[in-house]
Amino acid sequence: MSAPTIERRPVKGASRFGTKTQRANRPVRIKERGVDRVFMVGVYILLTTFLLAVLLPIVYIVASSFSDPRAVSAGRVTLWPVGFTLDGYIAVLSDPQILTGFGNSFFYTAVGTTVSLILTVALAYPISRRDFWGRSFIAGAVVFTMLFAGGLIPTYLVVQELGLLDTRWSLIFPQAIGVWQVILAMAFFRVSIPDELYEAAQLDGSSDLRFLWSVVLPLSKPLLAVIALMYAITQWNSYFDALLYIRDPDLAPLQIVLRNILILNQSVTGMDAAEMLRRQELADLLRYSLIVVATVPVMLIYPFVARYFTKGVMIGAVKG
Amino acid sequence: MLITPTATPRGTGRVKDTSKGLRAARRSLRRHWQLHLLVLVPLLYFAIFKYWPMTNAVIAFKDYNVVDGVWGSAWAGLDHFRRFFDNPIFWDLLQNTFLLSGYALVAGFPIPIILALALNEVRQRFFKRTVQMVTYAPYFISTVVVVAMTILFLSPRLGLLNAALGWVGIDSIDFLSQAEFFRHIYVFSDIWQTTGYAAVIYMAALAGIDPTLYEAAKVDGASRLQKIRHIDLPGILPTATVVLILGVGSVMAIGFEKAFLLQNTLNLSQAEIIATYTYKIGLLNADFSQASAIGLFNSVINLVLLVSVHLIAKRATGRGLF
C-alpha cells in the first residue's frame, strides 16, 4: 500500500530529519517521526513476543522428542535436544496400536473427504443457481441446523437405528456436510461462474449436470481444494464421534489412540516410582515423539489452506 | 432470468389462476430436473442426520426404553426437566458453563485485534509472513494434541513451566489437579491455539480500508498511533462487533471436546460443564431421556441467545447477522 514515500529518500550527509533546506522543500511536513520509530520498535517487540509464545512450546516438544529418554524424564530438556536419539520415534513406529490408528485415520480422511466434497457440491451448486426453484427454502433448512440441533443422544439413537454403531461409516456420514463449507461453495459459484457461461452452454445443448461437470468444476479447482483440505484436517483431528460410536479398538482413529496414550495415562500419577524406571522413561519420551508424528501431516498441508483461506476471507470482506 | 422463446412453458394457459410461484416451480422442475435430483442426496443427509434427531428429541418428554423405542415409550411430561433443575449440580453446571465461555470470550476477544493491528503496521514482508504463518499454525493442531501439550507443559515432573518456576525458587505446582487453575488453563491454551486464526478476519477488514484515508492522514501529519486510533479501529469496528455478538450468542454452545479432555477427578468441580455432563449421563449412565432433556434445554437457551443477539444487532447497527 505504501509506495516509496518522501520521507524514505536517502540523502547523504543529512541528519535523521534531513537538512534544513530539505525539510523546507518537502511538500509534506512529516511530524513525529521519532514517535513513530519508537512505536515501530514496540510493534516489533510485541510481534516477536507473539511469535515466541506460539513457537517455544512447539520447539520444546520437538526438542524433547529427539532427546535421551533419561533427560526427558528428569525434565532436563528445554529448547534443544539433550543427548540426541531417535528412540522415541522408533518406539512410536513399532507400536501396533499407533500404526493401526494411523492407517484408520488415513482411511477416514480419504473416504470422508471424498464423500463430503461430493455432497457439498451437490448441495451448493443447485442452490447457487438463481433459476433453481426452492433454493431459499433449502438454504434456510440447511442454515437452521446451525442454530438448533437435536442433541447428542437423539443423534446417537439415529446412528444406532441405522446400524452404523461400531462401523467405519459412523465416522463418515453423521458429520459429512459442513454448513460453513456449503456457504463458502455457494458464494464462490455465485460470484465466479457468470450466468453468460450457463446461457452459452444451454444454447449448445448442454444439460445441467454436463455443465456442472465440464464447466463449473474445472473453474472451481481452488475452491474444491480448499474445501477438501478443510474437511481433511477436520476429519484427521476429530475424536468426539469415535468416542461416541466406536468401541472396537481396531477401528479407532489416531486421535483416540492419542487420547489413550497421551491423556488417559497422564491421570495415573500415583504410580510406584521404583517400577520399571526405564520403561517409564521411554513412555515419557514416546509422548513427545507421538505428538510430533501425529501433527506433521497436518502441518505439511496447512500452508496451502491458510493461503487460500486468507484469500477467500478477504474476497468475502471486500465484496461484502 | 433468461427467457428464450423456445423455453416458454407450454402449460401457462392452464395454470394462469394459480400463483406465480407454482408456475416457477413447475418450470424449474421440468427444466432443471437434474439439479433437483442432485440436491436430493444432500437433502437426505440433512433429513437423516439433522432433522431426524430433532424428532428423536421428543424422548426428553418420555421415559425412553429400548424395547418400546422413541415413539412407543410412555410420556413423562416435564419430569426429566424438573429432575435436572432440582438437582443441586444444575446451578454448578450453569455457572461453570457461563464462567468458562464468558472468560474465554472476554480474554480471547482483544488479543487477535492487537495482533492484527500490529501485523498491519509491519512492511517487512518476510517478518510479517513468518509471524502470520506461525501464529496461525496451532489452529490446525488437534484438540487432543493441544491438551496433551498443555498437560506435558504443566506437568510437575516433566513440564517446562514448573522447571522455570524452580529456577526462581518456587515449588512445583500440579496445576491440573487444582480446580481453581482449570479455567485459566482452558482459556490460555485456547488463546494460544486460536489467536492467529482469529486475527485473519481482522486482517481482511484492515485490508479493505480505503487507502486514501491513510494518505489524507499522512498529509495531516498523523503519527502511526493516531492512524490506528482514527482509521484502523473505526475500520474494524463492524467486524469486531459481529465477532463479539456471535461469541455472546454461542456462550452456551461451548465445545465438549477440550473441557472433557482437560478434566480429571480433582478439577471436576469447575471443569464439569453442561456438554460434558450430558455425555456422562447419556452414554456412561445410559439415562437417555434425562440426557436428551439437558441437551434440549441447552439447545433452546442457545437458540434464544442467538436470536436475541441477532435482534439487538439489527436494532443497533441496522443489519442483522443473517
Image: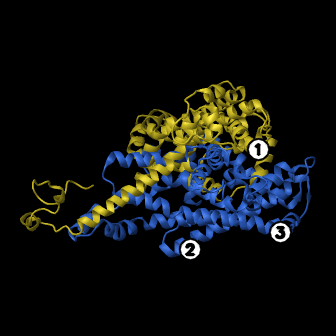
Q: Mark 3: which amino acid? A: Phe
Q: Residue at 42% across / 46% down in the picture?
A: B5
Chain with yellow colouring: A
Mark toward the viewer: 2 or 1: 1
In terms of depth relative to the viewer, which is nearer, A93 or A187?
A93
| Type of amino acid under label 1 | Leu
| Visual hue assigned to chain B | blue
Q: Quadrant location of residue B89?
A: bottom right
Quarter holding the N terminus of chain A is bottom left
Residue under numbered circle 2: B312
**One can see residue A226 in this view:** yes
Q: Are marks 2 and 1 on the same chain?
A: no
* Residue position marked by numbered label 1 in the rendering: A244
Q: Report the Cα–Cα distance between label 2 and label 1.
A: 37 Å
What is the x, y in percent for residue A159? 77, 43
Determine the secondary structure under disc 1: helix
Q: Is residue A258 left or right of residue B188?
A: right
Chain where mark 3 sits: B
**Residue B282: image location, x then y, percent:** 82, 52
Residue B207 rendering spot, x and y as whole percentages: 36, 57
| x then y, percent, for residue B277 | 78, 57
The dot on residue B85 is: 3
Real-space CA distance between mark 3 and mark 2, rounded to the nearest whole angstrom: 29 Å
- For mark 3, give the secondary structure: helix
The amino acid type of the residue labelled 2 equals Ile
Q: Residue at x 76, y 34 (%)?
A: A167
As helix, strand or loop, the secondary structure at mark 2 comes to: helix
Q: Is residue B31 visible?
A: no
Q: Mark 3 vs mark 2: same chain?
A: yes
Callout 2 environment at 10 Å: few (<14), some (14 to 19), or many (20+)? some
